Amino acid sequence: MNEKQLSERLVRVANYVPNGAKIADIGSDHAYLPCYLCIQDDKVTAIAGEVNEGPYQSAKKQVEKVNLENRIEVRKGNGLAVIEKGEVDTITIAGMGGGLIATILDEGKDKLIGVKKLILQPNVSADLIRLWLREHGWLLIAEEIIEEDEKIYEILVAEPGDDTELYAEKTKEKLLLGPFLIQQRNETFKKKWSYEIANWKRILQEFEKATETDQVKQKRNELREQIQMVEEVIK
């Protein structure tokens, strides 16, 4: 992977970035995504944020290598602390757990004023991001699920807005599985959730062996309901 040839998941992320965007790529690693976007669109500018010294230095070297220092600024800092209010209109966060992405958004929510688009690619726990978006006035407008190198990734795209209508029915199901992904129900989606169901059933067997307490009973019932809900969707 380099600035001209991204991984498939990052290409999918890049496809959602508007023309001429002012981007903050959080957890930018080698800054491949900002470099790729700037090469594709000469009006794009970017901030590449990294919290760790090694990736920060790698990103700086990469930006210098492709002579994009005048359009990409590499900054060291935690999450959205690397940007100022109103400085960018698009934020990309890719390759982290959904819980961490939700935490980054929550800790930096004052920096989201003026941001028009969030493009988020969690490796796991996308439901935690959907829940955060719901609770903070962001409308999910698109989702994708892809498999690459035997790993499955989800991509979530959101804009400021009211999502009442989106989640008017089957809220729990949509938050877990994704309202758009449920509609698409492609083979990758079915593969992911078939694997999750198998894992939950193994956990359920362990609960069956556990000493019966109110907590065990509650957890077991919740797991059974979740398995039934997901099985009905992927059939």
Image (tube, rainbow, N blue to C red):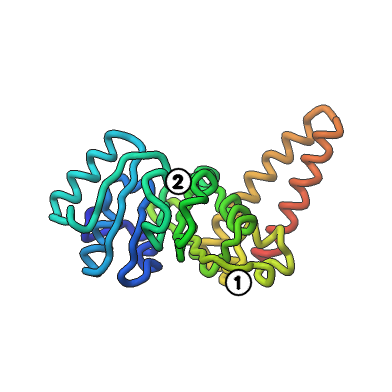
Q: Earlier in the sequence, mark 1 or mark 2?
A: 2
Instruction: Look at the numbered disc 1 and give the secondary structure of its residue.
Output: helix
Instruction: Look at the numbered disc 2 and give the secondary structure of its residue.
Output: strand
Task: Kindly indicate the quadrant of the structure image that contains residue 169.
Answer: bottom right
- Identified at 68% across, 66% down, the residue is 167
**Most foreground residue, 175 or 228:** 175
**Residue at the disc numbered 2:** 96
Task: Give me the disc on residue 202.
Answer: none
118 relative to 194 in the view: left or right: left
- Identified at 60% across, 53% down, the residue is 132
Alpha carbon distance from label 1 to label 2: 25 Å
45 relative to 212 in the view: left or right: left
Badge 1 amino acid: Gln
Looking at the image, is mark 1 or mark 2 nearer the viewer? 2
Structural crowding at the residue carrying mark 2, measured as other residues with C-alpha within 10 Å and reported as few (<14), some (14–19) or many (≥20): some
45 relative to 178 in the view: left or right: left
Q: Position of residue 43 (x, y in %)?
A: 25, 69
Image quadrant occupied by the C terminus: bottom right
Tag 1 near tag 2, CB within 8 Å: no
- Identified at 37% across, 57% down, the residue is 87
**Residue at the disc numbered 1:** 183
Q: Position of residue 192 (x, y in %)?
A: 55, 55
**Most foreground residue, 105 or 40:** 105
- Identified at 73% across, 58% down, the residue is 229
Q: Position of residue 144 (x, y in %)?
A: 49, 65
Q: Residue furthest top?
A: 211
Task: Kindly indicate the quadrant of the structure image that contains residue 70.
Answer: bottom left
Badge 2 amino acid: Met
Structural crowding at the residue carrying mark 1, measured as other residues with C-alpha within 10 Å and reported as few (<14), some (14–19) or many (≥20): few
